[in-house]
Image (spheres, grey):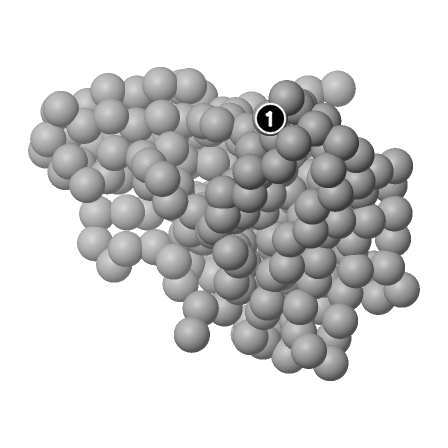
């Protein structure tokens, strides 16, 4: 009974490289959320996706960041031309359906470090 | 004004103590409410949902006050293992969907 699976657990990139973070939701969950947590900070919502659709990306930086959740395969959070300030823990969560009363199930997160 | 506000603490209490956290939210259209627990450098884990009538799960009691727009979490008989950050989460209506909005968390330290 796998929960939300994120990989890699740890990712190191040099400034200017690309980072790709993957998230496989709980089986049967069609709603995925990405959050970023800076050291000593709270969770910040980035983007909410359903299969093949971005529902809300109000928390995504306008440049360099993109997310997708294809019909097949995991959700991908992509950061191009990474900078030191992108160093953070990135958490993915999923829920089974839309609606107000759905709690989220979180993955273990990807710790991104930019050298 | 932040959408979901919590006292960051830390709350430093002895084992066996009772401790309570509050969380206020700004969007009156908010539909559902949760408490999560996050241990250092780990993922948040659902502690409990918060229902309008209030609800209890063992030593934990959650309450909702819609009129004043706050929720609370009460922990009785604190254990050392309760030491963690407690996150208040509010599902807020936004353009036809519901976006979970997290507070920054309240840090609890239970000492012997």
- Residue in the foreground of this view, choosing between B10 and A78: B10
Q: Residue at position x 77%, y 65% from top?
A: B64
Question: In this picture, is A61 found above or below A1?
Answer: below
Check the residue under mark 1 and report the chain it is in. B
For the residue carrying disc 1, how many other residues have a C-alpha within 10 Å: few (<14), some (14-19), or many (20+)? some
Give the x, y percent position of residue A89.
38, 33
- Residue in the foreground of this view, choosing between B56 and A79: B56
Which of the 4 quarters of the picture holds residue A113?
A: top left
- Residue in the foreground of this view, choosing between A48 and B15: B15
Which of the 4 quarters of the picture holds residue B59?
A: top right
Residue A112 in view of the camera: yes
Q: Residue at position x 69%, y 39% from top?
A: B46
Residue B98 in view of the camera: no
Q: Residue at position x 18%, y 28% from top?
A: A114
Quadrant occupied by the C terminus of chain B: top right
Quadrant occupied by the N terminus of chain B: bottom left
Which of the 4 quarters of the picture holds residue B26?
A: bottom right
Give the x, y percent position of residue A83.
14, 38
- Which residue position is annotated with label 1? B111
In the structure shown, which secondary structural element does the residue marked by tag 1 occupy? strand
Give the x, y percent position of residue B44.
58, 36
Give the x, y percent position of residue B76.
79, 40
Question: A26 left or right of B40?
Answer: right
């Amino acid at each position: 009974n796998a929960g939300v699976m994120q990989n890699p657990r740890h990712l190191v990139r040099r400034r200017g490289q690309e980072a790709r973070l993957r998230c496989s939701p709980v089986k049967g969950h069609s709603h995925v959320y990405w959050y970023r947590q800076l050291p000593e900070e709270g969770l910040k919502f980035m983007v909410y996706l359903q299969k093949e659709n971005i529902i809300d990306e109000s928390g995504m930086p306008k440049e360099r960041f993109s997310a997708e959740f294809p019909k097949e395969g995991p959700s991908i959070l992509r950061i191009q031309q990474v900078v030191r300030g992108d160093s953070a823990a990135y958490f993915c969560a999923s829920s089974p359906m839309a609606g107000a009363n759905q709690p989220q199930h979180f993955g273990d997160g990807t710790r991104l470090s930019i050298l | 004004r932040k959408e979901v506000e919590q006292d960051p603490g830390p709350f430093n209490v002895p084992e066996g103590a009772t401790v309570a956290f509050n969380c206020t939210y700004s969007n009156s259209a908010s539909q559902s409410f949760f408490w999560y627990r996050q241990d250092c450098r780990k993922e948040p884990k659902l502690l409990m949902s918060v229902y309008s009538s209030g609800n209890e799960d063992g030593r934990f009691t959650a309450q909702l006050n819609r009129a004043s727009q706050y929720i609370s979490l009460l922990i009785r008989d604190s254990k050392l293992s309760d030491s963690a950050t407690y996150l208040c989460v509010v599902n807020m209506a936004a353009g036809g969907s519901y976006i979970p909005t997290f507070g920054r968390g309240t840090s609890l330290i239970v000492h012997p």
